[in-house]
Image (tube, coloured by chain):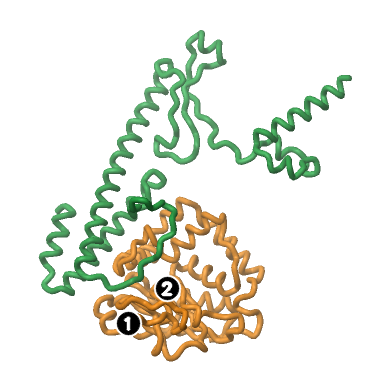
Chain colours: A green, B orange
Amino acid sequence: MNLSERLTTDRVAAPSQRAARDSLRSQIARLERELAGLVAAGFPHISAAGHRVAVGEREDSPRARPAPRLPGIEDLERERDALVGRLRDTEVAVAQRELHERRARALLQEMELEPARHKFMRLRVADLGGRGCGVYEVRPRLGLIGMLAGWWRLTLSSGCPLGRGRALSARPASLSSPRDRSRSFGSASRAASRACSRASAAGGR
Amino acid sequence: MSAGVHDIEAIEGWRAREVEEELPGLGVAFLHVDLPRSPSPLSASPQPLRERLQTLSNRFNGAKAIALRREPVPSAYRVFFRHIGLDPDAFPTPIEAAVRQRLIDGGFLTRSLLADTLLVSLVDTGVPVWALDAQALDGPLGVRLSREGEPLGGGRQSPPLPGDRLVVADSRLALATLFDEPAAECSVKGRSRRVVLYALQVPGVSWVCVEEALWICRSTLGARG
Protein backbone atom coordinates (compact mmCIF):
# COMPACT_ATOMS: atom_id res chain seq x y z
CA MET A 1 0.00 0.00 0.00
CA ASN A 2 1.53 3.33 -1.03
CA LEU A 3 1.59 6.49 1.08
CA SER A 4 -1.50 8.22 -0.34
CA GLU A 5 -3.53 5.01 -0.06
CA ARG A 6 -2.47 4.63 3.58
CA LEU A 7 -3.47 8.23 4.29
CA THR A 8 -6.83 7.84 2.53
CA THR A 9 -7.56 4.66 4.49
CA ASP A 10 -6.77 6.43 7.74
CA ARG A 11 -9.00 9.36 6.81
CA VAL A 12 -11.98 7.23 5.82
CA ALA A 13 -11.68 5.15 8.97
CA ALA A 14 -12.11 8.17 11.26
CA PRO A 15 -15.68 8.13 12.56
CA SER A 16 -15.83 11.50 14.31
CA GLN A 17 -14.09 14.87 14.17
CA ARG A 18 -11.83 14.16 17.12
CA ALA A 19 -10.95 10.75 15.75
CA ALA A 20 -10.20 12.43 12.43
CA ARG A 21 -7.88 14.90 14.14
CA ASP A 22 -6.19 12.04 16.03
CA SER A 23 -5.74 10.20 12.76
CA LEU A 24 -4.27 13.29 11.10
CA ARG A 25 -1.89 13.76 14.03
CA SER A 26 -0.65 10.19 13.77
CA GLN A 27 -0.16 10.66 10.00
CA ILE A 28 1.80 13.85 10.68
CA ALA A 29 3.94 12.02 13.24
CA ARG A 30 4.71 9.23 10.80
CA LEU A 31 5.50 11.63 7.96
CA GLU A 32 7.71 13.79 10.17
CA ARG A 33 9.72 10.73 11.29
CA GLU A 34 10.12 9.50 7.71
CA LEU A 35 11.23 12.95 6.59
CA ALA A 36 13.65 13.35 9.49
CA GLY A 37 15.16 9.94 8.65
CA LEU A 38 15.69 10.90 5.00
CA VAL A 39 17.17 14.31 5.83
CA ALA A 40 19.51 12.90 8.47
CA ALA A 41 20.66 10.05 6.21
CA GLY A 42 21.25 12.42 3.29
CA PHE A 43 23.30 14.98 5.22
CA PRO A 44 24.96 17.14 3.92
CA HIS A 45 23.63 16.66 0.40
CA ILE A 46 19.92 16.83 1.21
CA SER A 47 18.63 20.17 2.47
CA ALA A 48 17.17 20.23 5.98
CA ALA A 49 15.44 23.58 5.45
CA GLY A 50 11.86 22.74 4.74
CA HIS A 51 9.95 25.97 5.16
CA ARG A 52 9.16 28.01 2.11
CA VAL A 53 10.57 31.53 2.03
CA ALA A 54 7.86 33.98 1.06
CA VAL A 55 8.33 36.40 -1.86
CA GLY A 56 10.30 39.45 -0.71
CA GLU A 57 11.42 37.70 2.47
CA ARG A 58 15.05 36.79 3.05
CA GLU A 59 15.98 33.35 4.31
CA ASP A 60 17.65 34.87 7.38
CA SER A 61 15.12 37.60 8.11
CA PRO A 62 13.66 37.33 11.63
CA ARG A 63 10.03 36.31 11.80
CA ALA A 64 7.62 36.29 14.69
CA ARG A 65 6.98 32.78 15.94
CA PRO A 66 3.32 31.87 15.64
CA ALA A 67 1.74 31.02 18.97
CA PRO A 68 1.01 27.34 19.65
CA ARG A 69 -2.66 26.38 19.41
CA LEU A 70 -5.00 23.47 18.88
CA PRO A 71 -5.28 23.22 15.10
CA GLY A 72 -8.55 22.20 13.52
CA ILE A 73 -9.03 19.52 10.90
CA GLU A 74 -8.31 21.93 8.01
CA ASP A 75 -5.04 23.10 9.59
CA LEU A 76 -3.95 19.54 10.31
CA GLU A 77 -4.81 18.49 6.77
CA ARG A 78 -2.80 21.41 5.41
CA GLU A 79 0.14 20.43 7.59
CA ARG A 80 -0.18 16.78 6.54
CA ASP A 81 -0.37 17.70 2.85
CA ALA A 82 2.64 20.01 3.16
CA LEU A 83 4.60 17.20 4.78
CA VAL A 84 3.56 14.74 2.06
CA GLY A 85 4.81 17.26 -0.52
CA ARG A 86 8.08 17.74 1.31
CA LEU A 87 8.55 14.01 1.72
CA ARG A 88 8.02 13.50 -2.03
CA ASP A 89 10.45 16.33 -2.86
CA THR A 90 13.01 14.86 -0.49
CA GLU A 91 12.57 11.35 -1.91
CA VAL A 92 13.16 12.76 -5.40
CA ALA A 93 16.25 14.64 -4.17
CA VAL A 94 17.57 11.46 -2.52
CA ALA A 95 17.00 9.44 -5.70
CA GLN A 96 18.74 12.10 -7.80
CA ARG A 97 21.61 12.19 -5.35
CA GLU A 98 21.96 8.39 -5.46
CA LEU A 99 22.03 8.48 -9.26
CA HIS A 100 24.65 11.24 -9.19
CA GLU A 101 26.84 9.24 -6.79
CA ARG A 102 26.43 6.05 -8.82
CA ARG A 103 27.56 7.87 -11.97
CA ALA A 104 30.47 9.45 -10.10
CA ARG A 105 31.58 6.03 -8.81
CA ALA A 106 31.41 4.60 -12.33
CA LEU A 107 33.46 7.53 -13.64
CA LEU A 108 36.03 7.04 -10.87
CA GLN A 109 36.37 3.40 -11.84
CA GLU A 110 36.95 4.43 -15.48
CA MET A 111 39.49 7.05 -14.40
CA GLU A 112 41.35 4.38 -12.45
CA LEU A 113 41.28 1.77 -15.21
CA GLU A 114 42.04 4.09 -18.13
CA PRO A 115 43.65 7.25 -16.81
CA ALA A 116 45.02 8.23 -20.24
CA ARG A 117 41.45 8.62 -21.51
CA HIS A 118 40.58 11.04 -18.70
CA LYS A 119 43.56 13.41 -18.67
CA PHE A 120 43.33 16.10 -15.96
CA MET A 121 39.78 15.07 -15.10
CA ARG A 122 38.83 15.99 -11.54
CA LEU A 123 36.20 14.36 -9.35
CA ARG A 124 35.35 15.63 -5.87
CA VAL A 125 35.08 13.13 -3.03
CA ALA A 126 31.81 14.87 -2.10
CA ASP A 127 30.37 13.73 -5.46
CA LEU A 128 30.99 10.14 -4.39
CA GLY A 129 29.02 10.67 -1.18
CA GLY A 130 32.07 11.19 1.01
CA ARG A 131 32.80 14.15 3.27
CA GLY A 132 35.69 16.57 3.14
CA CYS A 133 37.39 18.52 0.36
CA GLY A 134 39.40 15.72 -1.29
CA VAL A 135 39.55 15.64 -5.10
CA TYR A 136 40.48 12.73 -7.37
CA GLU A 137 42.46 13.89 -10.39
CA VAL A 138 44.15 12.18 -13.30
CA ARG A 139 47.67 13.65 -13.46
CA PRO A 140 50.86 12.78 -15.34
CA ARG A 141 53.65 10.94 -13.50
CA LEU A 142 56.80 13.07 -13.25
CA GLY A 143 55.10 16.17 -14.66
CA LEU A 144 56.07 17.10 -18.22
CA ILE A 145 57.97 13.83 -18.76
CA GLY A 146 54.85 11.84 -17.88
CA MET A 147 52.74 14.01 -20.18
CA LEU A 148 55.07 13.35 -23.10
CA ALA A 149 55.49 9.66 -22.29
CA GLY A 150 51.78 9.09 -21.60
CA TRP A 151 52.24 8.05 -17.98
CA TRP A 152 48.96 8.99 -16.36
CA ARG A 153 47.70 8.06 -12.94
CA LEU A 154 44.81 8.77 -10.60
CA THR A 155 45.70 10.84 -7.53
CA LEU A 156 43.74 11.91 -4.47
CA SER A 157 44.41 15.33 -2.96
CA SER A 158 45.19 15.46 0.73
CA GLY A 159 41.92 17.15 1.68
CA CYS A 160 40.80 20.51 2.97
CA PRO A 161 43.31 23.39 3.00
CA LEU A 162 44.65 24.35 6.41
CA GLY A 163 42.86 27.11 8.27
CA ARG A 164 46.10 29.08 8.55
CA GLY A 165 49.44 28.81 6.83
CA ARG A 166 52.33 26.83 8.26
CA ALA A 167 54.68 29.77 7.61
CA LEU A 168 52.66 31.95 9.97
CA SER A 169 52.30 29.40 12.75
CA ALA A 170 56.00 28.46 12.56
CA ARG A 171 57.07 32.04 13.35
CA PRO A 172 57.68 32.77 17.04
CA ALA A 173 54.80 34.77 18.53
CA SER A 174 57.20 37.53 19.58
CA LEU A 175 58.16 38.19 15.95
CA SER A 176 54.66 38.55 14.60
CA SER A 177 53.05 41.91 15.25
CA PRO A 178 49.27 42.12 15.72
CA ARG A 179 49.13 43.68 12.24
CA ASP A 180 50.92 40.65 10.80
CA ARG A 181 48.63 38.31 12.67
CA SER A 182 45.53 39.97 11.28
CA ARG A 183 46.68 39.45 7.67
CA SER A 184 45.39 36.66 5.54
CA PHE A 185 47.43 33.52 4.95
CA GLY A 186 48.62 34.72 1.52
CA SER A 187 49.86 38.15 2.60
CA ALA A 188 51.45 36.77 5.78
CA SER A 189 53.42 34.15 3.89
CA ARG A 190 54.48 36.78 1.33
CA ALA A 191 55.72 38.98 4.20
CA ALA A 192 57.58 35.98 5.67
CA SER A 193 59.26 35.15 2.35
CA ARG A 194 60.26 38.83 1.85
CA ALA A 195 61.84 38.78 5.35
CA CYS A 196 63.69 35.54 4.49
CA SER A 197 65.08 36.91 1.22
CA ARG A 198 66.18 40.15 2.96
CA ALA A 199 67.95 38.05 5.64
CA SER A 200 69.68 35.85 3.06
CA ALA A 201 70.75 38.93 1.04
CA ALA A 202 72.21 40.53 4.17
CA GLY A 203 74.01 37.24 5.02
CA GLY A 204 75.47 37.03 1.52
CA ARG A 205 76.95 40.53 1.69
CA MET B 1 2.53 10.88 39.11
CA SER B 2 5.51 8.69 39.80
CA ALA B 3 8.41 8.85 42.18
CA GLY B 4 11.60 10.26 40.69
CA VAL B 5 14.72 8.26 39.96
CA HIS B 6 16.88 10.70 41.93
CA ASP B 7 14.85 11.12 45.13
CA ILE B 8 12.89 14.04 43.70
CA GLU B 9 9.25 14.01 42.99
CA ALA B 10 8.13 16.41 40.33
CA ILE B 11 4.54 17.55 40.55
CA GLU B 12 2.29 16.88 37.62
CA GLY B 13 0.48 20.06 36.63
CA TRP B 14 -3.18 20.38 35.70
CA ARG B 15 -4.55 20.50 32.17
CA ALA B 16 -7.68 22.24 30.96
CA ARG B 17 -10.32 19.77 29.76
CA GLU B 18 -10.10 20.79 26.09
CA VAL B 19 -6.31 20.44 26.16
CA GLU B 20 -6.48 17.04 27.82
CA GLU B 21 -9.03 15.80 25.30
CA GLU B 22 -7.21 17.13 22.28
CA LEU B 23 -3.58 16.53 23.30
CA PRO B 24 -3.70 13.67 25.80
CA GLY B 25 0.08 13.21 25.92
CA LEU B 26 0.85 16.82 26.86
CA GLY B 27 1.77 17.47 30.46
CA VAL B 28 3.57 19.97 32.62
CA ALA B 29 5.88 18.85 35.42
CA PHE B 30 7.15 21.31 37.97
CA LEU B 31 9.27 21.50 41.04
CA HIS B 32 9.70 24.11 43.77
CA VAL B 33 13.32 24.67 44.71
CA ASP B 34 14.93 26.88 47.35
CA LEU B 35 18.12 28.47 46.10
CA PRO B 36 21.11 28.91 48.38
CA ARG B 37 21.70 32.47 49.64
CA SER B 38 24.70 32.77 47.38
CA PRO B 39 25.41 32.82 44.46
CA SER B 40 22.59 34.73 42.81
CA PRO B 41 20.90 32.76 40.01
CA LEU B 42 21.78 35.53 37.56
CA SER B 43 25.45 35.70 38.54
CA ALA B 44 28.26 34.23 36.45
CA SER B 45 28.51 30.45 36.36
CA PRO B 46 31.14 28.69 38.47
CA GLN B 47 34.11 27.13 36.68
CA PRO B 48 32.84 23.49 36.80
CA LEU B 49 29.60 24.50 35.09
CA ARG B 50 31.50 26.38 32.40
CA GLU B 51 33.71 23.35 31.86
CA ARG B 52 30.60 21.20 31.59
CA LEU B 53 29.26 23.51 28.87
CA GLN B 54 32.55 23.22 27.04
CA THR B 55 32.48 19.43 27.24
CA LEU B 56 28.94 19.42 25.89
CA SER B 57 30.00 21.79 23.08
CA ASN B 58 32.42 19.15 21.84
CA ARG B 59 29.60 16.66 21.38
CA PHE B 60 28.01 18.60 18.54
CA ASN B 61 28.98 19.27 14.95
CA GLY B 62 26.88 19.89 11.86
CA ALA B 63 26.18 16.23 11.19
CA LYS B 64 25.16 15.64 14.80
CA ALA B 65 22.88 18.68 14.70
CA ILE B 66 20.99 17.20 11.74
CA ALA B 67 21.01 13.64 13.12
CA LEU B 68 19.44 14.94 16.34
CA ARG B 69 15.99 14.98 14.71
CA ARG B 70 16.06 11.16 14.55
CA GLU B 71 16.71 10.68 18.26
CA PRO B 72 13.63 9.74 20.29
CA VAL B 73 13.25 12.79 22.56
CA PRO B 74 14.08 15.55 20.04
CA SER B 75 11.95 13.73 17.47
CA ALA B 76 9.00 13.67 19.89
CA TYR B 77 9.24 17.45 20.35
CA ARG B 78 9.45 17.98 16.58
CA VAL B 79 6.31 15.93 16.04
CA PHE B 80 4.53 17.76 18.86
CA PHE B 81 5.50 21.13 17.34
CA ARG B 82 3.70 20.11 14.19
CA HIS B 83 0.69 19.02 16.24
CA ILE B 84 0.34 22.49 17.74
CA GLY B 85 0.74 24.38 14.48
CA LEU B 86 4.47 25.17 14.64
CA ASP B 87 6.92 24.25 11.90
CA PRO B 88 10.08 22.94 13.61
CA ASP B 89 12.14 23.74 10.51
CA ALA B 90 11.17 27.41 10.62
CA PHE B 91 10.95 27.71 14.42
CA PRO B 92 13.18 24.99 15.87
CA THR B 93 12.45 23.04 19.02
CA PRO B 94 14.42 24.17 22.11
CA ILE B 95 17.11 21.48 21.76
CA GLU B 96 17.57 22.15 18.04
CA ALA B 97 17.66 25.92 18.65
CA ALA B 98 20.37 25.42 21.29
CA VAL B 99 22.46 23.21 19.02
CA ARG B 100 22.00 25.58 16.07
CA GLN B 101 23.20 28.46 18.26
CA ARG B 102 26.17 26.34 19.38
CA LEU B 103 27.17 25.91 15.72
CA ILE B 104 26.88 29.65 15.10
CA ASP B 105 28.81 30.64 18.25
CA GLY B 106 31.36 27.82 18.06
CA GLY B 107 30.36 26.56 21.49
CA PHE B 108 27.70 26.80 24.17
CA LEU B 109 28.36 30.28 25.52
CA THR B 110 28.01 30.94 29.23
CA ARG B 111 25.41 33.54 30.23
CA SER B 112 24.48 33.09 33.89
CA LEU B 113 24.21 30.36 36.48
CA LEU B 114 20.51 29.84 35.82
CA ALA B 115 20.67 30.07 32.01
CA ASP B 116 23.67 27.71 31.88
CA THR B 117 21.96 25.25 34.20
CA LEU B 118 18.85 25.13 32.03
CA LEU B 119 21.06 24.75 28.94
CA VAL B 120 23.07 21.85 30.41
CA SER B 121 19.87 20.06 31.33
CA LEU B 122 18.39 20.66 27.87
CA VAL B 123 21.48 19.39 26.04
CA ASP B 124 21.85 16.38 28.33
CA THR B 125 18.25 15.19 28.18
CA GLY B 126 16.62 16.96 25.22
CA VAL B 127 13.84 18.13 27.57
CA PRO B 128 13.47 21.93 27.87
CA VAL B 129 13.12 23.40 31.36
CA TRP B 130 12.09 26.94 32.27
CA ALA B 131 12.31 28.75 35.60
CA LEU B 132 9.81 31.08 37.25
CA ASP B 133 10.00 33.24 40.34
CA ALA B 134 7.91 31.36 42.91
CA GLN B 135 6.84 34.63 44.56
CA ALA B 136 5.08 35.78 41.40
CA LEU B 137 2.98 32.60 41.15
CA ASP B 138 -0.38 31.71 42.55
CA GLY B 139 -1.13 28.01 42.83
CA PRO B 140 0.07 25.04 40.80
CA LEU B 141 1.05 25.28 37.14
CA GLY B 142 -0.97 23.89 34.29
CA VAL B 143 -1.69 24.17 30.58
CA ARG B 144 -4.78 25.85 29.19
CA LEU B 145 -5.97 27.96 26.27
CA SER B 146 -5.57 31.72 26.53
CA ARG B 147 -8.52 34.08 26.74
CA GLU B 148 -8.88 36.80 24.09
CA GLY B 149 -6.92 39.92 25.13
CA GLU B 150 -5.44 38.33 28.25
CA PRO B 151 -2.06 39.91 29.12
CA LEU B 152 0.87 37.51 29.44
CA GLY B 153 2.17 37.59 33.01
CA GLY B 154 -0.47 40.15 33.99
CA GLY B 155 1.82 43.14 33.38
CA ARG B 156 0.41 46.43 32.14
CA GLN B 157 3.00 46.56 29.36
CA SER B 158 2.41 42.96 28.28
CA PRO B 159 0.92 42.58 24.82
CA PRO B 160 -2.55 41.01 24.91
CA LEU B 161 -2.70 37.40 23.81
CA PRO B 162 -5.00 36.28 21.03
CA GLY B 163 -7.60 33.76 22.12
CA ASP B 164 -7.15 29.98 22.10
CA ARG B 165 -3.37 29.90 22.31
CA LEU B 166 -1.73 27.22 24.43
CA VAL B 167 -0.23 28.76 27.54
CA VAL B 168 1.37 27.67 30.80
CA ALA B 169 -0.62 29.28 33.58
CA ASP B 170 -1.12 29.31 37.33
CA SER B 171 -4.55 29.66 38.89
CA ARG B 172 -4.63 33.38 38.02
CA LEU B 173 -2.50 34.29 35.01
CA ALA B 174 -1.06 33.06 31.74
CA LEU B 175 2.68 32.94 32.42
CA ALA B 176 4.19 31.85 29.11
CA THR B 177 3.07 30.60 25.74
CA LEU B 178 4.05 26.98 25.24
CA PHE B 179 7.78 26.50 24.48
CA ASP B 180 8.45 30.22 24.87
CA GLU B 181 10.24 32.23 27.55
CA PRO B 182 8.08 33.23 30.55
CA ALA B 183 6.72 36.77 30.84
CA ALA B 184 9.16 39.24 32.45
CA GLU B 185 6.84 39.71 35.47
CA CYS B 186 7.27 36.12 36.60
CA SER B 187 10.81 35.41 35.41
CA VAL B 188 13.61 34.76 37.92
CA LYS B 189 15.35 37.85 39.29
CA GLY B 190 18.73 38.17 40.94
CA ARG B 191 17.10 38.36 44.37
CA SER B 192 14.80 35.34 43.83
CA ARG B 193 15.36 32.73 46.53
CA ARG B 194 12.60 30.31 45.62
CA VAL B 195 11.98 29.29 42.03
CA VAL B 196 9.68 26.94 40.21
CA LEU B 197 11.29 24.83 37.51
CA TYR B 198 8.91 23.42 34.93
CA ALA B 199 9.22 21.14 31.93
CA LEU B 200 6.76 20.14 29.24
CA GLN B 201 6.14 16.47 28.66
CA VAL B 202 4.92 15.51 25.18
CA PRO B 203 3.87 12.13 23.73
CA GLY B 204 6.94 9.94 23.29
CA VAL B 205 8.86 11.50 26.18
CA SER B 206 8.74 9.51 29.40
CA TRP B 207 8.12 10.97 32.85
CA VAL B 208 11.57 9.73 33.89
CA CYS B 209 13.20 11.92 31.19
CA VAL B 210 11.28 14.96 32.41
CA GLU B 211 12.23 14.29 36.04
CA GLU B 212 15.84 13.77 35.00
CA ALA B 213 15.87 17.21 33.37
CA LEU B 214 14.40 18.82 36.49
CA TRP B 215 16.81 16.91 38.74
CA ILE B 216 19.84 18.10 36.73
CA CYS B 217 18.65 21.69 37.12
CA ARG B 218 18.01 21.35 40.83
CA SER B 219 21.32 19.67 41.61
CA THR B 220 23.31 22.10 39.43
CA LEU B 221 21.73 25.10 41.11
CA GLY B 222 22.73 23.61 44.45
CA ALA B 223 19.16 23.95 45.53
CA ARG B 224 17.03 22.13 48.07
CA GLY B 225 13.66 20.75 47.07
- Dot 1: chain letter: B
* Left or right placement of residue A107 versus residue A150 in this view: left
In the displayed structure, would residue B72 be above or below residue B134? above
From the viewer's side, name the closer residue of B46 and B169.
B169
- Whether residue A16 is visible, yes or no, is yes
- Whether residue B5 is visible, yes or no, is no
The residue depicted at 33 percent of the width and 35 percent of the height is: A100
Q: Hey, what amino acid is under mark 2? A: Cys
Q: Residue B112 location in percent, x, y?
A: 60, 71
What residue is pinned by disc 1? B147
Which numbered dot is residue B209? 2
Q: Hey, what amino acid is under mark 1? A: Arg
- Name the quarter where the C terminus of chain A is drawn: top right
| Mark-to-mark CA distance, 1 and 2 | 31 Å
* Left or right placement of residue B27 versus residue B154 in this view: left
Disc 2, SS: helix
Task: Quadrant for residue A26, please give it.
Answer: bottom left
Q: Residue A88 location in percent, x, y?
A: 24, 49
From the viewer's side, name the closer residue of A53 and B141.
A53
